[in-house]
Image (spheres, grey):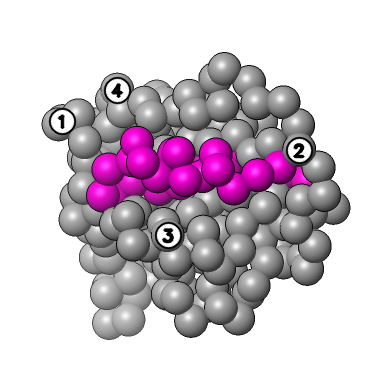
Amino acid sequence: MQDRLNDDQLTGFTTPHLADACLRAGVPVRCAPASLRAVVAGSRASGRVRPAQHVGSVDIFLEALGEASPGDVLVVDNAGRLDEACVGDLIALETKAAGLAGIVIWGLHRDTREIAAIGLPVFSLGGFPTGPLRLNARGPDALQWAAVGPHRVSTSDYVVADDDGVLFLPRDGLADIVSFARKIRDTEARQAEAMAAGTSLRQQLRFDDYLSRRRGDPTYAFRQHLRDIAGAIEE
């Protein structure tokens, strides 16, 4: 896998596809807390993480954008604060002009209407009218990593965000994750098509066979059955 993964290589994979693929690849699943959502429903962003730790002033974002490459996603660490917004319409405009793919905020945004009109995908914990009323000391690693919930991410990570949430993926092993995601997506698409044509999921997964074998062997797990028949669901 190249050092950079462009969005075209991730297009068509939802965060559920990629989360399941992490399980297949033996990679820890790093989902942001479920409260982190798209400002505009239907938004999607993916790209390399461009981290920035907010300390009360927008200059940290301007500096991060100066170091970013087109297709990156600005990931803002505001410690999950719910008493101030840290990103508004001007930073969204500047981020879009710099060619980035979106913004993920571990904190709040403001200027919701304007951000929706700008069209840049933004994910946050919600909207709030008040901006920062503080200015803290900036740490030496403020542009090296960002915390989002329990996860610390850096430019060695990629982020994919959609209506189901925000998922972080490591650069190392990304090729395997994408390969598994493609297999999962294609298998589930075939299963959905078969269901639409009248073949139930239970029939496709030979569920009666599984129940019969489990009666003879209570240790026989459904996931083992799926592996035996190359079914994608749950794995």
Q: SS of the residue at dot 3? A: helix
Q: SS of the residue at dot 2? A: loop
Decide which of tag 3 and tag 1 comes sooner along the chain.
Answer: 1
62 in magenta: yes
Q: Amino acid at mark 2?
A: Leu
Decide which of tag 1 and tag 2 comes sooner along the chain.
Answer: 1
Residue under the point 42% across and 74% down: 119
* Residue numbers of the magenta segment: 56-82
Task: Check disc 4: other Cα within 10 Å, few if <14, some if 14-19, many if 20+.
Answer: few
In the depicted structure, whether residue 205 falls above or below residue 168: below
Q: Amino acid at mark 1?
A: Met
Q: CA distance from mark 3 to mark 2?
A: 22 Å
Q: CA distance from mark 3 to mark 1?
A: 30 Å
Q: Which residue is mark 1?
A: 1
Whether residue 94 appears in this view of the structure is yes
Question: Answer yes or no: do the residues labelled 3 and 2 have beta carbons within 8 Å?
Answer: no
Whether residue 32 appears in this view of the structure is no
Task: Name the mark on residue 172.
Answer: 4
Q: CA distance from mark 3 to mark 4?
A: 30 Å
Residue under the point 49% across and 29% down: 143
Q: SS of the residue at dot 1? A: loop
Which of label 4 and label 2 is nearer to you? 2
In the depicted structure, whether residue 200 falls above or below residue 184: below
Which of label 1 and label 2 is nearer to you? 2
User: If the image is split into quadrants, where does the C terminus sit?
Assistant: top left
Q: Which residue is mark 2?
A: 135
Of residues 18 and 230, the one drawn nearer to the viewer in this rendering: 18
Decide which of tag 3 and tag 2 comes sooner along the chain.
Answer: 3
